[in-house]
Amino acid sequence: MGNEFDYISENLRRIKADIGEACAAAGRAPESVRLMAVTKTVAPEAVNHAIAEGVDLLGENRVQEFLSKKDSYDSSAEVHMIGHLQTNKVKYIINDVSMIQSVDSEKLLGEISRLAVKNGRIMDILCEVNIGGEDSKSGVHPDDLHELLMKASQTEGIRLRGLMTIPPPSESDIFLGRMSELFERYSGEFSMDVLSMGMTHDYADAVRFGSTLVRVGTGLFGARSYK
Ligand SMILES: *Cc1c(COP(=O)(O)O)cnc(C)c1O
């Protein structure tokens, strides 16, 4: 029997197979890479289909959109915030996400810390790195990363887990390589275990460069009308 969301099942099978192949080629265990479904603009019914098919991690970009959809999501999946987060919006999501991947300033870190402590929890975070040094992108500049990591590792209510990036679309390998180097340089010092990189167009490459978490939207749910 056909289902209107069969394409999601198909896409999911293909993405998992691709990740498996990329892992095999890189001599990595397939379980070493986690797949996140990025849900921006996607209807909750479609998201829930992906969850029913085995997706256990969702990525949210926009606070308003997440708040309007979260009660419709099957609650078995974990949710990470991956979009640029304004300090004054942290309070709306602090108890609904298990990780904030887009931390790029001490100010944001401070607010997450304050609310985590207030809510009696510890928030997992990744520091977002602007690896291409692009003006249009959020993320901390690589030269300022060590300082932010130091700060994050010493802040109450925060558990620093790793790094996240959205590399420039062209010359992707150069930037994936640089992220891989940064992660190797700092993961020991700060006990980091998550390198979040790789989207629809480059997740297999990202796996070659050591990504432990790939964030796929379009490849799973189809094209969006906006990014
Ligand atoms: C939209 C988005 C993705 C997924 O992008 P696709 O190209 O649709 O796979 C991944 N990470 C972040 C931070 C995003 O905003």
Image (cartoon, rainbow, N blue to C red):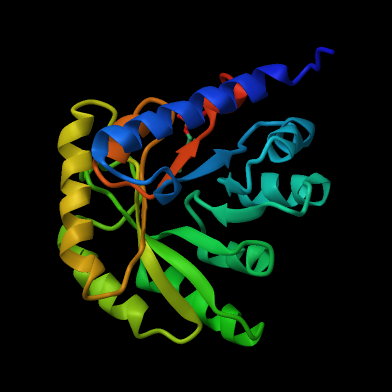
The residue most toward the top is 2
Compared to 10, does 98 lie above or below?
Answer: below
Asked whether, in this view, residue 94 is left or right of residue 109, the answer is right
Image quadrant in which you'd find residue 48: top right
Q: Is residue 101 above or below residue 124?
A: above
Quarter assignment of residue 194: bottom left
Residue 103 at x, y percent in the picture: 41, 62
- Of the pair 200 and 132, the residue shown nearer to us: 200
- For the N terminus, the image quarter is top right
Residue in the picture at 22% in, 49% down:
179
Which residue corresponds to the image point at 20% horizontal and 45% vertical from the top-left?
133
Q: Residue at x 57, y 46 (%)?
A: 59
Residue 182 visible? The answer is: yes
Q: Position of residue 25 (x, y in %)?
A: 27, 32
Up-down relation of residue 185 to residue 208 (above or below): below
Residue 224 visible to the viewer:
no
Total count of labels:
0
Residue 154 location (% of width, % of height) = 35, 85
Quick check: 154 left or right of 77? left
Q: Is residue 32 above or below residue 201?
A: below
Quadrant housing residue 95? bottom right
Pinpoint residue 64: horizontal percent, then vertical percent: 68, 49
Taking the spot 50% from the left edge, 80% from the top edge, the residue there is 113
